[in-house]
Amino acid sequence: MASPKSKDSSLSKKELLPAPRDGSNAKPRPRPARGASRYSPAEVNEIFRRFSVQRPEPKGELEHVNAFTLLVAVVLSAQATDAGVNKATRALFKAADTPHRMLALGEARVGEYIRTIGLWRNKAKNVIALSQALIRDHGGEVPDSRDELVKLPGVGRKTANVVLNMAFGQHTMAVDTHILRIGNRLGLAPGKTPEQVEQGLLKIIPDEYMRHAHHWLILHGRYVCKARKPDCPACVIADICKAEVKTTDVPAPLVPIAPLDPVEEVQDRSGTTA
């Protein structure tokens, strides 16, 4: 699939130069206003253009078969890894993939399926309660409104944003631990809270990239710009990146690159979604 094109998709050589390093000839870079991105619109466009080349069709890592099972999977993923959730839900979703079937299964049986997931007792209650609410208030269908989604038991803003983006194609930004870290480390959208980072990203990301921006940022944070030690040599935006600390000065290629090979998921307990 061809990557989206934009009149700002190509940067001048000057715009792509790395940030100056400390030294006798280095000029201090003016600090942007608090909460403002460190990147120009052309730089932001180039960052997401490269992500689109690297992963043209990024996929969420939570397994699901419809909007309801996606909703349940995201609710279960809080304080758990995607791999751990998938291991539990493969059997659960074979037994119940609709609110009516989940309700018929009952809280105790749901609990048996998800015992390996953290906080499984509370999550089993929420799965049954949200199934009841979907049947009672929405005819058994998952609503495509954030206001309605966050009324469901166990569903917060981040979960609602994931469902709206993945199930309904809406241009939302679900900020998990990875995106919160990247927004601040790179200075892409600094903020103290997930909602501040969310609003910052929504302001700067070009519309043509919003459909997949959430996944690109999560996967970049999970596999490249890791919490403990960023893998800068593997980063496709290293030469544009304005993080204050980097692990290498080797610049990224300024040409399209091949997709990354699958790698093993980082086993953190960040509760990442999608």
Image (cartoon, helix red, strand yellow):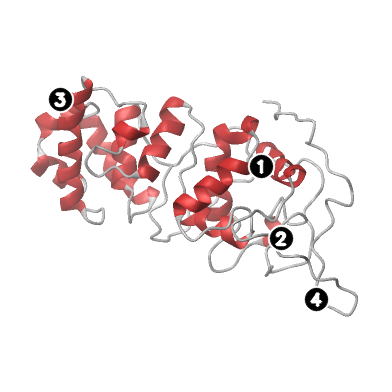
Which mark is drawn over residue 22? 4
| Residue 130 horizontal side relative to residue 40, left or right | left
Q: Quadrant of residue 221?
A: bottom right
The residue carrying pointer 1 sits among few (fewer than 14), some (14 to 19) or many (20 or more) residues within 10 Å by Cα, namely many
Amino acid identity at mark 1: Phe
Q: CA distance from mark 4 to mark 2?
A: 13 Å
Which residue is labeled 1 in the image?
51
Amino acid identity at mark 4: Asp
Which residue is labeled 3 in the image?
136
81 or 179, which lies in front? 179
Amino acid identity at mark 3: Arg
| N-term-proximal mark, 3 vs 1 | 1
Q: CA distance from mark 3 to mark 4?
A: 62 Å
Where's residue 52, x and y in %?
66, 37
- The structure residue drawn at horizontal position 28% and vertical position 38%, both measured from the top left corner, is 72
| N-term-proximal mark, 3 vs 2 | 3
In what quadrant of the picture does the C terminus appear?
top left
Which residue is labeled 2 in the image?
242
66 or 241, which lies in front? 241
Q: CA distance from mark 3 to mark 1?
A: 41 Å
The residue carrying pointer 2 sits among few (fewer than 14), some (14 to 19) or many (20 or more) residues within 10 Å by Cα, namely some
Q: Are the residues tagged 4 and 2 within 8 Å (C-beta)?
A: no
Q: CA distance from mark 1 to mark 4?
A: 29 Å
